[in-house]
Image (tube, rainbow, N blue to C red):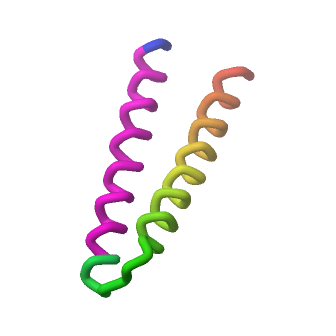
Amino acid sequence: MLWRYAGLAFQMLAAIGLALWLGYLLDQWLGIRFPAFMIIFSLLSLALLLWRIVKDTSKHDR
């Protein structure tokens, strides 16, 4: 059980890092000075990951 949550933590770190990197690249490619896509992608990935964690942990409580 502990390894499963450790895996989820690693997935969160990797997904948020990937979202930040892709947002940075898109901001650079479009020439936007404000990091709009970096913020949007990181918040979107965080919301999706939190939804997945709630879904996975509530499934195990039953």
Name, please, the residue furthest toward the right: 62
Total number of numbered discs in the rendering: 0
At x 59% / y 52%, what residue is drawn? 47
Horizontal side, residue 23 vs residue 41: left or right: left
The answer to whether 14 is drawn above or below residue 44 in the figure is: above
Residue for point 25% across, 82% down: 29
Residue extending furthest toward the front? 33
Picture residue at 66% right of the left edge, 37% below the top: 54
Q: Give the farthest residue toward the top.
A: 2
Image spot of residue 53 (x, y percent) = 58, 37
- Mainly helix, strand or loop, the magenta region? helix
Q: Position of residue 46 (x, y in %)?
A: 53, 50
Compared to residue 9, the image places residue 40 above or below, namely below
Corner quadrant of residue 55? top right
Residue 32 point in image, percent of width and height = 37, 83
Does 26 appear above or below 12? below
Task: Give x and y (percent) for residue 11.
Answer: 39, 38
Q: Nearer the viewer, residue 9 or 55?
A: 9
> Which quadrant holds the C terminus?
top right
Position of residue 30 in the picture relative to residue 9 (left or right): left
Q: Is residue 5 above or below residue 54?
A: above
- Residue 52 magenta: no
- Name the one closer to the observer, 34 or 18: 34
In percent of the image, x 31 and y 76: which residue is there? Answer: 26
Q: The magenta stretch spans which residues?
A: 3-26
